[in-house]
């Protein structure tokens, strides 16, 4: 089974900050990686697919990069609506989620 | 607009059964694989099960294999999951989600339902 490890688990940041979240796979997953945003009590929302492709309607301040085993999600300028938990997910072999990164207000 | 609406959750005793449903609309249901993902209280997302568009292929996480059965009724645009021998650790919000790619299984999930709560407790 492919394991996904995100870091950090919690991130404290201010509005306007540049934020980077890392996701590592236990084996190569090529670019078969998605990122989701989840707010409390809500379903996850797709942000990025195929490691770096922005889902339609998602603000351009979100970007993804990486391939193989190491990936990053970057928010170029954190907005109030971005305080949430973010999950990576591999879909190279079935599906596995990372444990999540909570972005909280500093 | 694509809609996925889950139902069937509730409180059940350990060892009991529940059947979850997910009603889909605004897309050609039979063209897409569907997935169940769960989230235990205060925890992250866990993939549970998936089924191909035709229903001919099914996939399960080890944690539910042999206890849960995924199925679909393409004539009614509905996804199901029969959950037997429920355990306390199955307590979670269960989401149904749509695979993104026509005719394939195992891609990213582009639409999610709002979730249904399953609580296993005596």
Image: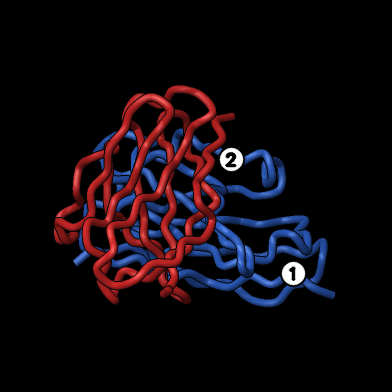
Residue A51 horizontal side relative to residue B85, left or right: left
| Image quadrant containing the C terminus of chain B | bottom right
Question: Helix or strand or loop: what does disc 1 sit on?
Answer: strand
Q: Could you confirm whether marks 2 and 1 are on the same chain?
A: yes
Q: Residues within 10 Å of mark 1 (few under 14, many from 20)?
A: many
* Chain letter tied to red: A
Label 2 – label 1 distance at C-alpha: 20 Å
Residue B17 horizontal side relative to residue B96, left or right: right
Chain B colour as displayed: blue
Residue pointed to by mark 2: B60
Residue pointed to by mark 1: B120
Comparing A89 with B7, the one in front is A89
Q: Residue at x 16, y 61 (%)?
A: A59
Residue B100 horizontal side relative to residue B116, left or right: left
Marks 2 and 1, the one that precedes in the sequence: 2
Comparing A21 with B38, the one in front is A21
Q: Residue at x 30, y 55 (%)?
A: A46
x, y percent for residue A1: 59, 29
Q: Which mark is residue B29?
A: none
Comparing B115 with B24, the one in front is B115
x, y percent for residue B49: 54, 46
**Image vertical order of residue B23 relative to residue B58, above or below:** below
x, y percent for residue B1: 19, 67
x, y percent for residue A43: 41, 67
Note whether residue B22 is visible. yes
């Amino acid at each position: 089974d492919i394991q996904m490890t995100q870091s950090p688990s919690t991130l404290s940041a201010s509005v306007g900050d540049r934020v980077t979240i890392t996701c590592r796979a236990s084996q190569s997953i090529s670019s078969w990686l998605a990122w989701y945003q989840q707010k409390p009590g809500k379903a996850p929302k797709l942000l990025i697919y195929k490691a770096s492709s922005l889902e339609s309607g998602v603000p351009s301040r979100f970007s993804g990069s990486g391939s193989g085993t190491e990936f990053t999600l970057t928010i170029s300028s954190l907005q109030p609506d971005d305080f949430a938990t973010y999950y990576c997910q591999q879909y190279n072999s079935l599906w596995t989620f990372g444990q999540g990164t909570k972005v909280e207000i500093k | 607009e694509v809609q996925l609406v889950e139902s069937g959750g509730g409180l059940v005793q350990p060892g009991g059964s529940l059947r979850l449903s997910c009603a889909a609309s605004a897309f050609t249901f039979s063209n897409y694989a569907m997935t169940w993902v769960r989230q235990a209280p205060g925890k992250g997302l866990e993939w549970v099960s998936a089924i191909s568009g035709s229903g001919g292929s099914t996939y399960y996480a080890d944690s539910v294999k042999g206890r849960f059965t995924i199925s679909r009724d393409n004539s009614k645009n509905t996804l199901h999951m029969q959950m037997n021998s429920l355990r306390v650790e199955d307590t979670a919000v269960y989401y149904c989600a749509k695979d993104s790619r026509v005719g394939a299984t195992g891609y990213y999930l582009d639409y999610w339902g709002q979730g249904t709560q399953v609580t296993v407790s005596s």
